[in-house]
Image: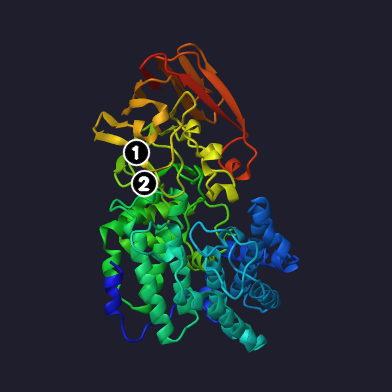
Amino acid sequence: MFSEISGELPDILGDFTPGAVSADRKRWSAVPQAMRDAVVRDAETALARTWPLITASDYRAYTETGNRSRFEELYFTRRRMLNDLVLGELVEGSGRFLPGIVDGIFLIAEESGWQLPAHNAYERGGPRLPLPDNSQPVVDLFAAETAALLATIVALLGDELDRVSPEIAARVKREIEIRILTPYLGRHFWWMGRGDERMNNWTAWISQNVLLTALSLKADQPTRRAVVEKALGSLDAFLKDYAEDGACEEGVLYYRHAALCLHGALTVLNSAAPGLFDRVWRQPKIRNMAEYIANMHVAGRYYFNFADSSAVVEPCSAREYLFGKAVGSKMLADFAAADRATANDPHLPGEWNLWYRVQELLVGRLPAAKPRPEPPRDIFYPGIGLFVARDGQFSLAVKGGNNGEGHNHNDVGSVTLYKNGCPFLIDVGVETYTAKTFSPRRYEIWTMQSAYHNLPTFSGVMQSAGEDFGARDVEVEFGDNCARISLDISAAYPPEAELRSYRRTVSLMRGRHVEITDAHDGDKPAVLSLMTCLAPTVTSEKIDLADLGSIVVEGAGMIEIDEIEVDDLRLRSAWPEKLFRLRVPLAGKRLTLRIV
């Protein structure tokens, strides 16, 4: 799709301006007053703070302990402080934040490496080096994000910075040339795409930021052409691993780093070659990718989640709204506008990408917020085997697919269920990332294991990771009275599970109940896990989940309950301090759960 456009690029590629320059006081004065006040308050707070010190020991700590959070807190705090100061200056235009901005620029310019310690490697999955080698920069997600941040500052505040000293912008351009543009054009990083190698959100995310950087800084024509051509090849590599249905296999959280960054890349490319990418915006696949987030919405902040995505997701921003407008999806534009109106902090104080925050301010108030449009009642994404069905009471999802997907959890056949917009059967999500999360020991982490999804275990044998472990014989039907998926999940387990088949049938009997029927043909006893955030009360034939509802059980032995203390900050953003796992043994070869 993209590579074929390379031959049609115009002789002169245009610039990209990531917002309104500071001198455009009319645009900046039009920012809604409440946003202006919040931005200036944050800038004043940043101005009064001391910049975090980052030492070599802080960088090395990752390889020594596996802890990502401590270094990343220092690293991202610098960038958020600089963000806050820049936005304060753009909104106010008085010059009082410029000294702090210059300090932040030079602190970041003097860092030995812009890549995170967790990404400090030259090959995919290669060893993480304890310190950055500034003679061989690594272009990772956040090196590219840092370049985009600095390029956006120069593009919007360049004249004001030049009045302080021309060396400021000159330094930014030198550092970006050395750390980003030269390695980007001169070597191959895995996320750029090569042959059939699978790509993920890195490809769109980094490509967007490199494009923004090169075109915002008005690189010379040979450089910008080389960057654009290479990015087009990468975007094709990214798209090849998306099915036509547009589902993000990494979950709704990563939609914003994947499909939404594709939108960002296209926005920059459209500025470089106006009109040339119109055909891409019109592709049904791109529209499907855009609408995915709205289709995954349940209620409030809750979304159907799997992989490393959380069940609770921050409100939409102007980006989703603009994506909806670009692909002609009124549904997504209306959904994003209504969702954005629920945000407590519409100026995105937690965001480190300055371009996103500038967009948020400049787009101003969106059309009068209406109730969020209802997502499709039923949808099936064959690319990842995701089944979704709803009625006025229940919202149901079943994950088929395989265990070799991006940010994978071993969850083939798992059920997620909400009742009246409240979580009933849950997908726990993922804890705070550490070195272990993306290592060969990933599946030692409990949240990744099928035993902590709504799935069976066979004498302790759980599902295995890898593309070969997946669902078979999947059947889906949607009707007025019933929506149903049936799938055999036995192939998701290793041979030691001694399974011949395990057919799960999940039905939404609209206006009545949800039914899960598991038929087991194997030699080892099966125990079904059910995960919930509600304290259960169990009798011989029924499980009550607080006041939300009940599960009537047929074909089970003695049910046991495990309490799981939740002290991880990432999990606590979605769940209370205690989760519960019900362990339901199959008394025979068939188990039926009727959820009312």
Quarter occupied by the N terminus = bottom left
Disc number placed over residue 295 in the picture, else none: 2
Q: How many marks?
A: 2
- In the image, residue 16 lies at what x, y percent? 44, 78
Mark 2 is surrounded, within 10 Å at the Cα level, by few (under 14), some (14 to 19) or many (20 or more) other residues, namely many
- In the image, residue 562 lies at what x, y percent? 58, 24
| Closer to the camera in the image, 20 or 296 | 296
Question: Which residue corresponds to the image point at 34% horizontal and 78% vertical from the top-left?
Answer: 273
Residue at the top extreme, as displayed: 540
- In the image, residue 523 lies at what x, y percent? 38, 20
Disc number placed over residue 591 in the picture, else none: none
| Closer to the camera in the image, 51 or 342 | 51
To which residue does mark 1 refer? 388
**Element carrying mark 1:** strand
Q: Quadrant of residue 337?
A: bottom left
**Element carrying mark 2:** helix
Cβ atoms under marks 1 and 2 closer than 8 Å = yes
Mark 1 is surrounded, within 10 Å at the Cα level, by few (under 14), some (14 to 19) or many (20 or more) other residues, namely many
Tell me which numbered mark, 1 or 2, is placed earlier along the sequence.
Answer: 2
Amino acid type for the residue under numbered disc 2 = Asn
Is residue 480 depicted above or below 196 in this figure?
above
Question: Which residue corresponds to the image point at 35% horizontal and 50% vertical from the top-left?
Answer: 247
Q: CA distance from mark 1 to mark 2?
A: 9 Å
Left or right: residue 539 compared with residue 384: right
In this figure, which colouring scheme has been used for the structure? rainbow
Is residue 415 depicted above or below 383 in this figure?
above
